[in-house]
Image (spheres, helix red, strand yellow):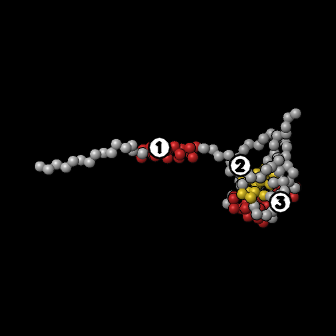
Amino acid sequence: MHFRRQAKESDGVNLTPLIDVVFLLLIFFMVSTTFTKESHLKLNLPEAAGPQAAEEPRAVEILISADGTYAVEGQALINKKLTTLKSALSEVSAGEYNRPLVITADATAHHQAVVRALDAAGQLGFVNLSITTRQPEQN
């Protein structure tokens, strides 16, 4: 009788389970991480002493810098025209004009820039508008 020898198993470490665990940890941390909302415009908010409004979900946000530059949902617009602002708001809101709209303007921004943002929102049909302020410093 002629018996065949079985091939010896290698004595190396199997890395497949280790890689699976690392990928699972990576997915877990990616899903459970909260991301901070950062904007690339430096704003100095105006002050107001009233109570804070309750935060509403899924609000559309317009940022207005000191020189009147607009950013909708963190994306800077190419110019300061009303038509550009309206098209950006339409694109972001996807026709849902009942969503809240938050205008965050620099304290030194021109009044015309804020009025233009309010005008664009009104022309599109936004009715739930709010303007972001900060609490005054206590002396």
Left or right, residue 31 beside residue 108: left
Q: Nearer the viewer, residue 115 or 19?
A: 19
Three-letter amino acid code at disc 2? Glu
* C-alpha gap between disc 2 and disc 3: 24 Å
The residue pinned by badge 1 equals 21
Residue farthest to the top, as pictured? 139
Left or right, residue 75 beside residue 138: left
Of mark 1 and mark 2, the one earlier in the sequence is 1
Identity of the residue drawn at 49% across and 47% down: 23
Which image quarter holds the C terminus?
top right
Q: Nearer the viewer, residue 59 or 75?
A: 75
Left or right, residue 118 beside residue 96: right
Give coordinates of residue 115: x percent, y percent.
85, 57
The residue pinned by badge 2 equals 38
* C-alpha gap between disc 1 and disc 3: 53 Å
Disc 1 crowd, CA 10 A, few/some/many (<14, 14-19, 20+): few
Give coordinates of residue 63: x percent, y percent.
77, 53
Identity of the residue drawn at 71% across and 46% down: 56
Against 45, is 97 above or below? Answer: below
Identity of the residue drawn at 80% across and 39% down: 51
Q: Nearer the viewer, residue 139 or 121?
A: 139
Residue 13 seen anywhere in this rendered image of the structure: yes
Identity of the residue drawn at 72% across and 57% down: 75
The residue pinned by badge 3 equals 116
Three-letter amino acid code at disc 1? Val
Of mark 1 and mark 3, the one earlier in the sequence is 1
Disc 3 crowd, CA 10 A, few/some/many (<14, 14-19, 20+): some
Residue 124 seen anywhere in this rendered image of the structure: no
* C-alpha gap between disc 1 and disc 2: 32 Å
